[in-house]
Amino acid sequence: MSRIRQDAQWTALVDALASASPSTVRDALEGTVGDAQAFCWAALRQFERREAQVRLSEARDFGLHHADLHTLLIVAQEAVAHVELIELVLDALGEPSSLPPGADLRPRLREARNLLAEHRDERVLFWRLTGRHTPRVVKGYRRLGIELPSGTIDSEVLGYVPPPDASAEEVQAGLASVGSIGGLLSLPELRRELLLLSDALDRLASECAARRAAT
């Protein structure tokens, strides 16, 4: 289900959907699906990059590992933001559909992107100076109903128990070496949902192409 926003840009977008011709809306859907695929592929590639960095003894390797996490969160959130637009367009076409990731993961990913990536500079400096979380961090965790960690929210649990339904391929691919970030977001769960999303977007892209070829 697409996230409903209350702002002028969202209202203008909804109005544009309502006034556009069905063929225009179909073309817009196909383009938006392609955009979502690009960001989904980019997020999955970031997981591959992180799994390839097995040595973190050097300061440069550790720094790149951390920076790759930021890029991962940003492109993953971009993929989900495009998914919410796809759901909006499908609803306008009378074809409502809910795509991965689920409603529980979406706000946690959005908050993780905001707190861990976009506002990291001020947040980390404040932590180093005071040993306390910024008001933005406190509000973010409170919104999600998650308990604040006693340490920095940048801490990553490098090891976890795979879920019961995890495949041998998932474990072998390196998922057992990554865990949760700041108690806020499970990276294995995010990767699993992105893989599901990639498949769903492939199906949508094929349907759009087939419909276009038939007209």
Image: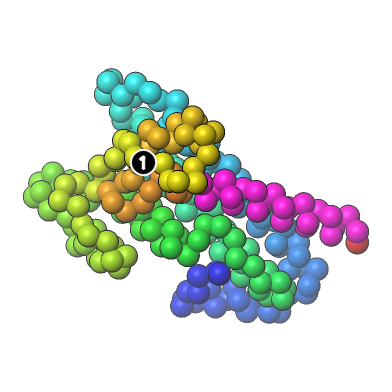
Question: Residue 197: x and y, percent?
Answer: 59, 52
Q: Work out whether residue 63 or residue 206 is closer to the camera in this orientation and state it.
A: 206
Q: Quadrant of the C terminus?
A: bottom right
Question: Residue 200: x and y, percent?
Answer: 65, 53
Q: Is residue 22 left or right of residue 11?
A: right
Q: Residues within 10 Å of mark 1 (few under 14, many from 20)?
A: few
Any magenta on residue 139?
A: no
Q: What is the total number of numbered labels drawn onto the structure image?
A: 1
Residue at 59% across, 50% down: 196
Instruction: Name the residue carrying label 1.
Output: 161
Residue at 27% across, 20% down: 57
Q: Amino acid at mark 1?
A: Val
Residue at 38% across, 48% down: 186
Any magenta on residue 196?
A: yes
Question: Residue 99: x and y, percent?
Answer: 59, 60
Residue at 69% across, 49% down: 202
Furthest residue to the left? 130
Seen in the picture, residue 25 relative to 157 is either above or below; the reply is below
What span is in magenta? 192-214
Does residue 52 appear in the picture of this structure? yes
Please name the predominant secondary structure of the magenta segment in the image: helix
Does residue 48 appear in the picture of this structure? no
Give the structural element (helix, strand or loop) at label 1. Answer: loop
Seen in the picture, residue 49 relative to 120 is either above or below; the reply is above
Q: Quadrant of the N terminus?
A: bottom right
Furthest residue to the right? 214
Q: Work out whether residue 20 or residue 5 is closer to the camera in this orientation and state it.
A: 5
Question: Residue 139: x and y, percent?
Answer: 24, 65
Q: Is residue 64 left or right of residue 3?
A: left
